[in-house]
Amino acid sequence: MVVEVEPVRGLTVQQVGQLATQQLQTNAQHTALLWSFDVEDRPKKRSMMAVAFLLISTGDIGGQPIGALIWSSESTGAKLVKDTHGGFEIILGDATQGCSKTTVSIGVSDNGTVVADKKSLGQVQ
């Protein structure tokens, strides 16, 4: 399974209409929200399909969150969990869905820099 994490500043009205279930996890300073896309109607680009939209924020009024689309080469679901290092993980796929399992690590540094699998997504303000 090929997975891409694409930083985005917003979603189109069409993409918002394709969102389905929401998952939430928090650590000491940040909140992670993961909205899965409807499996029957998800955004596509090339051979990839959008699995979910990730939002990381401080929860502070007026704060600037970081958003990202999670793309996969396989039709799969996504689960958001806390990792053992104070960050988050997105688990994609499993054997019951007939596809391989892949994990995307999401780290947030003390200064608010968000990193997904060593790729900087931006800084939560």
Image (spheres, grey):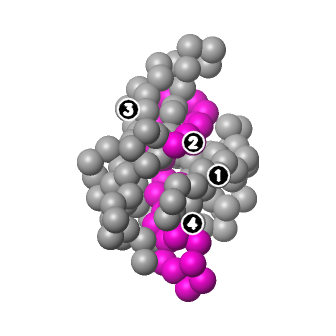
Q: Which amino acid, mark 1?
A: Leu
Between the residue at mark 3 and the residue at mark 2, the CA separation in whole angstroms equals 18 Å
Q: How many marks?
A: 4
The range drawn in magenta is 54-82
Check if mark 3's residue and mark 2's residue have beta carbons within 8 Å.
no
Circle on res. 24? 1
Q: Which amino acid, mark 3?
A: Val
Residue 110 location (% of width, % of height) = 34, 65
- Alpha-carbon neighbours of circle 2 within 10 Å: few (<14), some, or many (≥20)? many
Q: Residue furthest front?
A: 28
Q: Is residue 63 magenta?
A: yes
Between the residue at mark 1 and the residue at mark 4, the CA separation in whole angstroms equals 19 Å
Which residue lies at the image location 51% right of the left edge and 32% below the top edge? 92
In the rendered image, which residue does mark 4 sit on?
Answer: 11
Which of the marked residues, 3 or 2, is nearer the chain's N terminus?
Answer: 3
Which of the marked residues, 1 or 4, is nearer the chain's N terminus?
Answer: 4
Q: Which amino acid, mark 2?
A: Leu
In the rendered image, which residue does mark 3 sit on?
Answer: 2
Q: Provide the secondary structure element on which disc 2 rests.
A: strand
Q: Residue furthest left?
A: 118
Residue 97 location (% of width, % of height) = 62, 19
In the rendered image, which residue does mark 2 sit on?
Answer: 80
Query: Looking at the rendering, in which quadrant would you find the N terminus?
Result: top left
Check if mark 2's residue and mark 1's residue have beta carbons within 8 Å.
yes
Query: Looking at the rendering, in which quadrant would you find the C terminus?
Result: bottom left
- Is residue 106 rendered to the left or right of residue 24? left
Q: Which amino acid, mark 4?
A: Leu
Q: Is residue 72 magenta?
A: yes
Which residue lies at the image location 43% right of the left edge and 49% below the top edge? 86
